[in-house]
Image (cartoon, grey):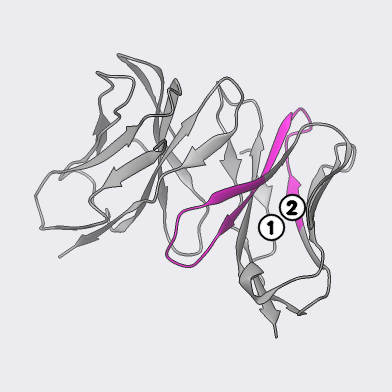
Amino acid sequence: DGGITQSPKYLFRKEGQNVTLSCEQNLNHDAMYWYRQDPGQGLRLIYYSQIVNDFQKGDIAEGYSVSREKKESFPLTVTSAQKNPTAFYLCAVGGLTDTQYFGPGTRLTVL
Amino acid sequence: QKEVEQNSGPLSVPEGAIASLNCTYSDRGSQSFFWYRQYSGKSPELIMFIYSNGDKEDGRFTAQLNKASQYVSLLIRDSQPSDSATYLCAVNMGGGYQKVTFGTGTKLQVIP
């Protein structure tokens, strides 16, 4: 069954804690993206990766880190340096064209 | 700052009517345009993409692109209550490989 999976669906973080959000795909797409969505705002790009072992900062990378060790996986770590992390986090994948497809998302809440 | 702008709505239409959603973008050199549908609490779902000036139809959906005027529209014919969602416009304004800028979305309400 092809698709994009994100886990967990809901995540709660305490102050000062790092948390990692998972994104996995079996669509064999090269490009993967992380976005953040806040109420009343458009999707904002955090990081993107075009190929394994390479990634670039997006518009709001501060307080976040990523890795791309496998084509299928692009995990996002929200560090304690991110002061306002409560948001809906969306992973997307893209192929040769610039069309992007989204996973189901992870909703992160700071306690 | 490259921008994609949409009226936040809500846009209310009666069931069976045509819903017209509009989007303007700032970069005249933009090449690719996308419409996503996002139900409350869910992730965006791609419903249309368009690259060339003119109309592109897919079932009840028609995307219209006018590059000279820098706007793209989405028409939904025979609107159904299940079409009630937020519609996101997205534009590749050439900021990098496959980098796409999203609008804030228009909330559509289809009234039975």
Q: Is residue B78 left or right of residue A6?
A: right
Mark linked to residue B23? 2
Q: Which of the pair A69/A37 is nearer the observer?
A: A69
> Label for residue B91?
none
Where residue B19 sits, quadrant-wise, is: bottom right
Looking at numbered disc 2 in the image, what kind of residue is underneath it?
A: Cys
- Image point (85%, 37%), residue name: B67
Q: Residue A96: image x %, image y %?
A: 57, 19
**Pointer 1 residue:** B6
Q: Which residues are magenta?
A: B22-47
Chain containing mark 2: B
- Amino acid type at circle 1 is Gln
Q: Is residue A94 left or right of residue B15?
A: left
Work out whether B23 lies above or below A65: below
Q: Would residue B7 appear left or right of A63 to someone viewing this image?
A: right
Instruction: List x then y, in percent, for residue A63.
Output: 25, 40
* Residue lying at 36% horizontally and 51% vertically, measured from the top left: A105
Kindly give the residue lying farthest to the bottom in the view shown: B112
Q: Is residue A55 above or below residue B34?
A: above
Q: Determine whether label 2 and label 1 are within 8 Å by CB.
A: yes
Q: Chain under label 1?
A: B
Measured from the top left, where is residue B17 in percent x and y? 83, 74
Using the rendered view, name the quadrant where residue A98 is placed: top right
